[in-house]
Amino acid sequence: MEEMLELSRKLGAEAEVYKITSEETTVKFEANRLKHIQGKQSSSTSLRIIKDGKIGYATTSGQTNPEKLVNAAVETSRFGMEAKFKFPSFTSFPEVTINDAEINKITMEEMIKLCENMIAPLREHTPDLLCEAGVSKAIVTVELVNSSHGKASYTKSIFSLGVEGTLVRDTDMLFVGDYTSSCQPVVNVQELTRSVIYQLECARRQAKVSTGKLPVIFTPDGFTSAFIASLTAAFNGKLVLEGASPIGNSLGKLVFDEKFTLIDDTLINYKPGSRPCDDEGVPSQRTLLVEKGRVTAFLYDLQTAARAGKKSTGNGIRGGGLPSPAPGALVIEPGNTPYNEMLKDIKEGLVIEQLMGAEQGNVLGGEFSGNVLLGYKVENGEITGRVKDTMISGNIYDLLKNIIALSEEHKWVGGFMQVPYVYLPAVSVASR
Amino acid sequence: MDIELVGHELLHLLKNAPADYIEAHLEESESSYITYRGKILESIGRNSAIGGNVRALVKGGWGFLSFNNLESLSSRIDAVIKQAKLASTEAFYLAPVDSYKDNVPADCPLNPVTVPLEDKKQILDEYNELIWRTPKLQTSVINYGDSRKKTIFINSSGSYIVQEKMHVTLRVTAIAADNGEVQQAGISTGSTGDLSFLKTLHPEIERVSKHAVTLLTAPYVKGGEYTVVLDPVLAGVFVHEAFGHLSESDHVYENERLRELMKIGKRFGGKNLNIVDGAAIPGLRGSYKYDDEGVPATKTYLIKEGILTGRLHSRETAAKMGEKPTGNARAISYRYPPIVRMTNTYIEPGNISFSDLISDIKEGVYVKNWYGGTTSMEMFTFSSGEAYMIRNGQIAEALRPVVLSGNVFTTLHNIEAIGNDLEMNQGGGCGKAGQSPLPVSNGSPHIRISKCLVGGR
């Protein structure tokens, strides 16, 4: 890594080398039976340079030829964007625990057993359920050095597990499932299987719902499937800078319901979205994005922050290319209404567990429209069955202006976003 | 490092490996990309990658190991066989195929990755200027990418297949904004290496830029059931989502009830409906000579005259369903095992002109272009990039883009009319089981569907 800094320096360029290596083992069950065991080893090295004031970039996977990489970066720098930032010189970072050596000790046999433990209770509840289950463990190591003497490195362990069930009756198909991840081994699967059994219970019968505006409770997963893409875009400092975020001009303004508070927090121990620094070597922080409905901040990487006259929030993330602003781990503050109370409040409405295709509309504008893949009808305070052939649509800015309640229960969806149940008064429902 | 040298070493190692079956993939790739956000060239870069994998089958259990360190291959083979043994349950055999030794060069004589970045940038600059000439336009996003990939497939039956593939993709999005309202419109296109298509997109880019601005004041459609007419691009996404995924046998082969539901000979649509998938159709982004299990590509009729006649297979699904392999096992890279995927999927053309297709629709929706689509097998959604009301047989006012939804067991029956104007779209990328985007093409003529559920206000 130091060699590439030196080679770049000789060519008159400042430089940053980012290296990520990972080892991952996955055990997979299909159709209720053990099917695959997979292992993945990979490493990639990215070189970002600033030469003659412009950014150049090249990456390579596998064996690295330092000279070739430096030359490719120099070639691209001729056309690259003007660098408005300097490589940072941070060498110390906040404490956050994201590596648990216990993960190494989990054997493949134990992972197989965990899959069996997820499938067995579901099949006991619904014998003709066809299950897929997977458990994986990964160790990821990140190293970064730059020509400003900035230096960072950390190792993260990630343990994930999930189970999905399919039930086919005539031409009717039901899909249920849940998954979770943590930096620690998850050996108790009860929470996961309980949530899937709840889905099976709720979906036992079918129910018809009216077309029109209805009260809707989004479960943590349901909220994520419908709202997360638009929320992520709205707080992206780059889209704000370009004028493509609908709330770009709303700093300090009340945009959402006062019950709504949103935080990007990458410093929570053992959460897979946590890390001591971002992919540019900027220390992690806790960024309050919405405080009681008022927009308080946007997310920035170094270049975007410099262009916008702001400071990096430690949200420079590499998704294959140059770092770009992205949330690390979003947290929506829970409320104090129990989920059951929400249900009791509804005369006719829906619980949305999973929306399909919601991210395919005008995400930037905050619009979503999706087919209810898993959702239940609520009648006079009780779940009466699963709805099908139903679409719901809306605009997140209209909908989140008026929240009836947020639940006290909350869930880490996939390990990356903490969300409560969100109860909204009127969402467009179209059903046949 | 030369992957051919490693390949020859592997050929020898695999032959003697103690597994029911074992195969290896080696891959060497290079790519370049240019991204504009607004007037600024935001990123331009080059990637190169090298890597491989081994996959073993022992008594019905699969082991898979991917790596980009190509040393100590014999210990990787030992490890993957150990994994496969641990996963073993009940032995099965893969559908038999011949072994091949072949070398398949890319379609295109010129590697697009080696074309100077300057030349590519010049074309993109022209498009960006064109977009920015449109009044009320807030910003634009242009994503250009090209790649060249050389792969070697080797298996324990002696196959040794070298294939080279190239891809070019371009997505242009124009974003209009006014009063906190943001709307977007765009195009998505691609090729198997040839860059000439890049030079002819001016009129289409000008049109979508203006359309993004039009959308700012366009009304929302009222949610409900409509007769909809799909343009070839969106109808291509529709056939891919609505039926294509259900014809991938890995969804079906271990599910008794689904097998029953998907019996060959079952009627899915009217006599006018023919749906095809095939990598053997040359020159498209889903085309190839051998799949990632070394099986020669085919052309498969999934539906012929409305009746289910075929499905897509890997060697495992073909064996377990007692059918013939179709050469549809694909992996996006060496980091993943091959799974059953589509290639080039389309609805065959009928004989109705576009104006006849809409002439007797009193009130309906005309949808064009795509944002995306997804499926749960039974139910699917797909979203349009543009939408218009149809009133009294004429295209009327523009609407906000819409999301459409359907149920595979009813919607295909509701295809009332099929146009005569088949077009293939090369801009698609398909996602499945974490493997995305896989190069595919989709196509169709204009089609008309009755009673289609449209999301709206």
Image (cartoon, coloured by chain):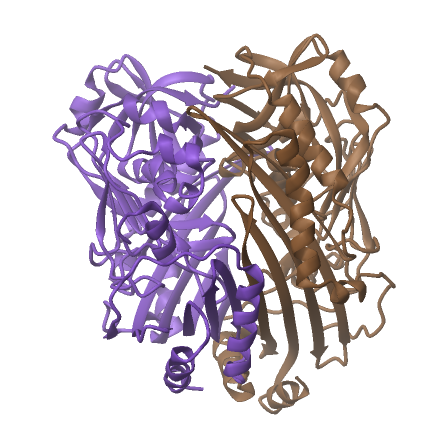
Chain colours: A brown, B purple
Whether residue A12 is visible to the viewer of this picture, yes or no, is: yes
- Residue B144 at what x, y percent from top left? 41, 60
Is A260 positioned to the left or the right of B202 in the image? right
- Residue B110 at what x, y percent from top left? 26, 73
Residue at the limit of the structure toward the bottom, as seen here:
A10
The mark total stands at: 0
Residue placed most toward the observer, B330 or B326:
B326
Residue B160, quarter of the rendered image: bottom left
Q: Is residue B301 above or below residue A432?
A: below
Q: Is residue A103 above or below residue A86?
A: above
- Residue at 34% x, 45% y: name it: B321
- Residue B368 at what x, y percent from top left? 33, 34
- Residue at 60% x, 24% y: name it: A375
Residue placed most toward the observer, B9 or A63:
B9
Residue at the limit of the structure toward the left, as seen here:
B351
Residue A429, quarter of the rendered image: top right
Quadrant assignment for the C terminus of chain A: top left
Is A420 positioned to the left or the right of A82 in the image? right
Quadrant assignment for the N terminus of chain A: bottom right
- Residue at 79% x, 20% y: name it: A340
Is B3 positioned to the left or the right of A114 in the image? left
- Residue at 48% x, 31% y: name it: B216
Residue placed most toward the observer, A14 or B383:
B383
Q: Is residue B379 above or below residue B328?
A: above
- Residue A314 at what x, y percent from top left? 75, 59
Whether residue A179 is visible to the viewer of this picture, yes or no, is: no
Residue placed most toward the observer, A203 or A18:
A203
